[in-house]
Amino acid sequence: MPQADPPHVLEIGDGERVESATAWREQRRPRLKALLRQYVYGYAPPAPRRRFDVDEVHESVFAGAATLKRIAIRFPDLPQAAPEIRLALFVPTETETPNPAVFGLNMAGNHTVADISHLSVPAWARERETAAEHLLERGERADYWQVRETIDRGYAFATACTWDIHPDTPEMGLTKYCWHHHGDVPGALRGGALAAWAWGISRCVEYLLEDPDIRDDAIAAFGHSRAGKATLLAGALDERIALVIPHQSGTAGVALSRREATASSGETVEQIATAFPHWFNGYYPMFATDVGRFPIDQHHLVALVAPRAILATESTPEADAWTNPNAARLSIRRASTVWDLREDQTLSDDEVSQEGGSIPDDAPPILHYRRDAEHTMTPEYWEAVYDFADQHLEHGSTP
Ligand code: GCU
């Protein structure tokens, strides 16, 4: 079925367009947040009172290059059965404190990001193993996360696992207890796993804002694939995140849902809503076969990050067709108009999209960076992330 072009990012109805950064911020932004919650992700609950417990501090990890803190974010007003969010934070020891930080949402457990004896395998990971899921051992994803290299670049690295916040199943996690605590919202508007994970990222950011080792104007959030979708949502909604790095986030992430014009053959809204209905609210699947009826598209979500920085790291259609890299590139190009409002500039399509190589010294605050790589994270992508972060976290970019 032919799909209409996505609505212009500045359009507020009847063809009228927002013309100033103030109008964007005061009129368009709140409306878009509501539309994205209404049509795609749903609402997350208000955050209940929380407590940050620094349970462990290990001063000499990576041969003394970093200190590891293990923090539990606990919710004292929720029933005891409610899970806690466990955060692992690596702080470089050889830099001047406070440090810029990258938060990465992992999907397999904090113990997988580095082979460090203090990172024990959590009970839920063992339980999942008996439920026929492969248990990842300590440090098994170290090559993927490159924590040591992050430290060497002068960044703190924080991570928490999706499963602490919401299992990747229709069964709800922590947010279920929060909803009960605050009185429920109507079922169809209640957020799914993506909204819950984004909510969890914000709780972790709140800890980082209080940690004296972290610069509160220099917190970046990274996530890959489904975690990339949640990270983009968190970055769009939470203005305390100065830099957002959705990696190969695909459908319901950076990629436009209306993707006909981009000749993309990857995942459709219908496919994602059928395979993973628990990621969304109750309405999203109703539009799955006719995405032209959505009043919004994913470039609106990207645009909510403005004027902060966003680096969408992507693959090529040949290497990772499922994530619709061309639809992601168009989304970034369409969204970039919103950054122009403030800077009195016009970012060209070429300026906001780059094919491989190094990040230029004057990288714009919104960039689609493509490498010919599979659906995973590599040292080359991390290098691009830190080269970009060096520029855009230097003086902070909070609005
Ligand atoms: C599936 C899903 C994608 C998702 C991916 C992942 O392939 O269809 O939308 O991004 O899983 O999280 O790895």
Image (cartoon, rainbow, N blue to C red):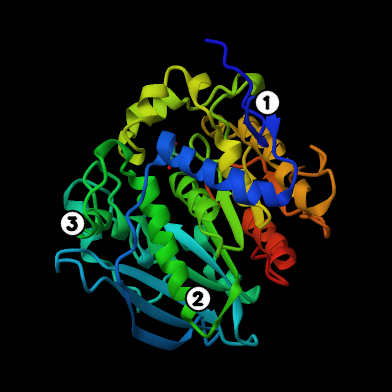
* Quadrant in the picture for the C terminus: bottom right
Instruction: Give the image quadrant in which the ligand numbered 1 is located.
Output: top left
Calculate the distance from the C-alpha at mark 3 to the C-alpha at mark 1: 54 Å
Name above or below for residue 148 compared with residue 135.
below
Calculate the distance from the C-alpha at mark 2 to the C-alpha at mark 1: 41 Å
Q: Which mark is residue 298?
A: none
Name above or below for residue 230 compared with residue 260.
below
What percent of the width, then of the height, locates residue 352?
76, 44
Q: Mark 1 belongs to which amino acid? A: Gly
Is tag 2's residue or tag 1's residue first in the polypeptide sequence?
Answer: 1
Residue pictured at 36% horizontal, 38% vertical? 280
Question: Around disc 1, counting alpha carbons within 10 Å, would you say few (fewer than 14), some (14 to 19), or many (20 or more)?
Answer: few
What percent of the width, then of the height, locates residue 286?
36, 23
What percent of the width, then of the height, locates residue 77?
21, 71
Question: Around disc 2, counting alpha carbons within 10 Å, would you say few (fewer than 14), some (14 to 19), or many (20 or more)?
Answer: some
Q: Mark 2 belongs to which amino acid? A: Leu
- Given this view, does label 3 or label 1 mark the residue nearer the observer? 1
Q: Is residue 248 visible?
A: yes
Name above or below for residue 291 compared with residue 301.
above
Q: Please name the residue that numbered disc 3 is placed on.
A: 127
Identify the element where label 3 is drawn: helix
Q: Please name the residue that numbered disc 2 is placed on.
A: 209
Q: Please name the residue that numbered disc 1 is placed on.
A: 15
Check the image and name the residue furthest to the top: 1
Calculate the distance from the C-alpha at mark 2 to the C-alpha at mark 3: 33 Å
**What is the quadrant of residue 122 in the picture?**
bottom left
Question: Around disc 3, counting alpha carbons within 10 Å, would you say few (fewer than 14), some (14 to 19), or many (20 or more)?
Answer: few
Residue pictured at 49% horizontal, 61% vertical? 104
